[in-house]
Image: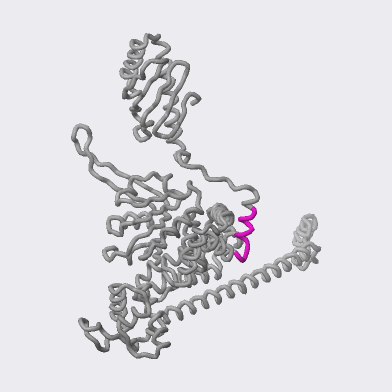
Amino acid sequence: MKNLQIHNPRFITYQDTQFTIDVLGGVDTTSVERMICTLRISYADYPPFRTTLDLYNDSQSDGLIRDLCDKWELRFSDCAKSIHGMVLQLESYRFECLRYPNQQGLEEPILSEDQKAKALACLSSKQLLLNIQQDFQSIGIPKDDENALILFLAMASRNLNRPLSVLCTGTGSYHYPLIQKLMACLPESQKSIHTHMSENALYYFEQHQVEGKVLVVEDLDWTTKMLKPLMALQNTGRLIKTQASKNKDGLLYATTFDFRTKLCLIAYSEESSKAPLSELPFLKLNLGLSPAQEKELLHYERQSRAGTINHQSSQEAYQNLRALLQCLPNQSIRNPYAPLLELPKELEDNHRALLIFLDFIEVVTFFFQHQREQKVDPETGEVYLETEPEDIALAIELLSNSLFKAREGISTPARKLLEWIQTWEGNSGEKGFTAIDIRKEKMVHPRTLNRYLKELCYFNYLSIVGGNKYKGGYRYRLSDFQSASHPGAETEAHIKALMQRVQDFQKSRKNKNLKEAEEGTVSKGRGTVGQKALSKPQARTGPKKVSGTVQKREKLKAKTDEG
C-alpha cells in the first residue's frame, strides 16, 4: 500500500505517476462481497472527475476506464493499470482492517523501564492504598473517598474473566469531575466513553470496541429496555438479538446480531423508581460527600482557579495511577474461603449480594497480585492466585457503606439523616422535633426532607407523636425500634463472626500444612533407612536347597534297597 495514504477511515487518497484519486467516505468493511466507493479523480490541470461505482463490477470498472480515456485522451492500458492498482491496494487495506480490528483504535502507550519498575515497587509495597490516596489528593479527589477507590478497582478489573461493573447514583454534580479524573488514569485504547447510550446500541457494538476496555456511560437511562441487555451481558457475556428485515425486493428475512464480550461498565444515572434495582447484577454506589470532603473539594477548586496548584505533581500522579493499571496482567483467582462467606439473611436479595461480594473479593486479590504468591494446580498445571483473609477484610471495609448497609431497608441519605438526628437530639436534649426544626439546623430541601422522614417512619425508625399536616407539620420522635440507635447492628455482628470463621479456617490450614510437611520429612527419612537395610545381605532362614545330582542318587539307592 505504498501509493495509499489513509488520512482517516473516511478519507483515503491514492496517488501514482498518472492520477490522484480521493476515496470519499472510505471503504465499507461490512460488505466484503462488493466495494462501492465514491471517487474523485484528478489528472494534470483538468477539472476532477467524480463518480460512484462498485469496483468489483467488471462492467462498471471497464466503463470508468473508457470514460477516462475518452475524456482525457489517454491510453487504455495506462488507465487500466492505475485503476486496477488502486483496487488491489484498497482491497489489501480492507483485509487488514478485518484481520486486525484492534489496530483501528489508538495504540496502548508503552511504559519506560523506570516507570515500570516504580509501578511494580508500588504494587509490591504494603503502603499501596496510602500511595493511591495521596495520588488521588494530588488530582483533586478528596481524602478517604471510598467510592473513588472502588471505582479505581473496578477499572483495574477490566482484564479479569469476570470484570466488576458499577452503577453510580446521586443527586449532586460531584460524579462528573470524579469520573472524568478517574478516566484520565486510563489510556485512550482502554476506555470507551459515551455521554448517552440508547437501548439498542449494545447490539451494534464490535467486540474490539468493548473487550478489555472500561465502558463509561455518563447518562444512563434506568429503564427496563436499557437495563435488561446490560444484565444479560454481565451474567452471560453474550447478547443475541433477532429481528425482521426486508431486502431490496421487499421480502422479509431474519437478521441476528450476536455480540460477545466481557463487560466492565461504569455508569451514572439519577435514581428512578421504575427501574428494577434489586435485580441488577451490578454494584451500586451513592456518590455523596461528607461535609469535610466537600470542603476539601471546594478548597482544591479555589486553588486551581487561583493558579496555586502544582500541575507537575498532578501530571505525575496521573502517570503513576496509569502505570499501576497497566502493570496488572490477567490472573486466575481462587478463593478457598468462599464456602464460609454467608451474608446475613436480613439483606435484600441475598443471592445477588453474595455474587457481588465474591466478585469484589476477586478484584481485590487481583489488584494485590504482586503481594500474593503464585500457586500451581498439580492436576491441571494452572497457575493461580489464592485469596487471603486480608483481601476479604478490605472488601468488607470498602463495601460496608454500599453493599451491606444499603440493603438494611432505608436508603443511604435517609440513614445519614437518621444518624444526624440522633446526634442532634442527644446534644440538644429535646424529645421530639418537626421538619422545621431540622431545616433550621441543616440545609435541605423541604420535599427531600419530607421524603426522608416518610421513609424513616415507614421502617419504624421514627414515630409521629403529634402535630398536623396542614398546621406546622407533624411532630416526630425516635422510636424504640431495636435498630434505631444502632442501624445494622445485626449485620455488623454477622460480619464479625464471618471474619472470625475465616481466620480460624486459615489457622487450621496452616496447621494442616505443617503436619503434612513434618510427616513427609519423617516418611522420607524412614524410606532411606529401609533402603539401606535391604541392601545388606540377609541370612537364609528357610531349608537349604538340595542339588539335582544328590536327589537322583538317593532315588537309585532307594530302588536298589527295594529290589
In which quarter of the view is residue 448 placed? bottom left
* Left or right, residue 245 beside residue 227: left
User: Considering only vertical position in the picture, is 81 above or below 500?
Assistant: above
Q: Nearer the viewer, residue 71 or 337?
A: 71
The location of residue 362, given as percent across then percent down, is: 50, 62
User: Considering only vertical position in the picture, is 260 above or below 410?
Assistant: above
Question: Which residue does the image show at 41% across and 34% down from the upper left?
Answer: 9
The location of residue 208, given as percent across then percent down, is: 43, 44
Question: Which residue does the image show at 42% across and 22% down from the upper left?
Answer: 86
User: Considering only vertical position in the picture, is 338 above or below 496?
Assistant: above
The location of residue 245, given as percent across then percent down, is: 23, 40
Question: Which residue does the image show at 31% across and 19% down from the upper left?
Answer: 60
* Quarter the C terminus occupies: bottom right
Q: Nearer the viewer, residue 194 or 85?
A: 194
Residue 422 visible in the displayed image:
yes
Q: Is residue 350 magenta?
A: no
Which segment is the magenta one? 117-127
Magenta stretch: helix, strand or loop mostly? helix
Question: Furthest residue to the left?
Answer: 250
Q: Nearer the viewer, residue 279 or 213?
A: 213
